[in-house]
Amino acid sequence: NPAADVVIAGCLAQRDGEKLLETTGARLVIGNARRLQVVELLEEAINSGQRIAAVGDVLRIPYEPLTISAHEGHTRAVLKIQEGCDRYCTYCIIPYVRGGIRSRQVEEIAMEARRLAKAGFSELVLTGIHLTSFGRDLGDVTLLDGIRACMQEGIQRIRLGSLEPVIVTEEFVKALKETPVCPQFHLALQSGCDNVLQRMRRRYTTQEFRTACRLLRDAFPNCAITTDVICGFPGETEEEFAETCAFCREIGFARMHVFPYSARTGTKAA
């Protein structure tokens, strides 16, 4: 469709907006700060005959209330409740292009859950850039409050996106048992070697990860635990790689997403 107007959005657009406008011929390049205005900005660009780079500052913006009431062709719905991250892992560009932690208001989560239930969805998948941090910017609010807000009439199952093992305490697991959460938990590992975890600036140890898995399996027998692992992180030795392999065998993950290290310009690891 040669007459189409192209819009480039997302993290690459946030980082390289002007460059992409120059090199791609896109009508609109929009970052992660002005997504609600995409239609308005595209119409402005078309009507003025201009090409626009609409990339705002993501470091000091509130949660952007993008809503949805249906997922065509899907039997379960994704409900995003958190944006941004302030962990600054040494390999990750996310804090620079998505900004700091912003959480969705609990009342808004409940409203969208009701809309999705009314549309016929019985399962919700709660997602976020750093779901473990949900609520830290809202005062006395935690991820459990976000989960409970989804317990609306018609919602039979709630599935959680990626978590860090530090959130898995005895109190957290006990509270989860009182919710319709699916017994499948994605705990991001990245490395099974403590030295590598330190260089990655991950804020847990393999022992803490091991304990989190035990707590989940004690509370949810036969639950599925999945993970992410990065291979070839800068400085990783054969011995450290072997430690990771052994740790993964010990834990016995249901599924693993394994990635080769990929440098991100501007990060410490790069």
Image: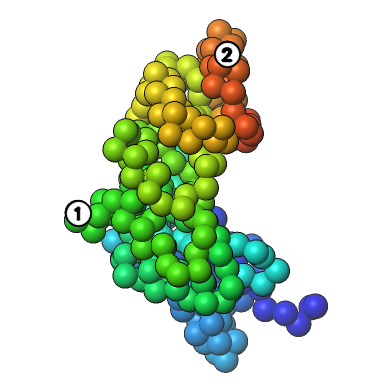
Residue at the (57%, 36%) spot, across then down: 224
Report the front residue among 94 and 108. 108
Residue 110 in view here: yes
The image quadrant of residue 46 is bottom right
Residue positioned 42% across, 67% down in the render? 152
- 207 versus 137 height, above or below: above
Give the total number of marks visible in the rendering. 2
User: Mark 1 is on which residue type?
Assistant: Asp
Question: Which quarter of the rendered picture does the N terminus lie within?
Answer: bottom right
Badge 2: residue crowd in 10 Å (few <14, some 14–19, many ≥20): few
Q: Position of residue 225 (x, y in %)?
A: 55, 34
Instruction: Determine which quarter of the picture holds residue 71.
Output: bottom right
Q: CA distance from mark 2 to mark 1?
A: 39 Å
The mark found on residue 246 in the picture is 2
Q: Residue furthest bottom?
A: 47
Dot placed on the residue nearer the N-terminal end, 2 or 1: 1
Looking at the image, residue 36 sits to the left or right of residue 139; the answer is: right
Front-most of residues 9 and 208: 208
Q: Which residue is mark 1?
A: 140
Residue 15 visible in the shown view: no
In front here: 2 or 106? Answer: 106
**SS at circle 1:** loop
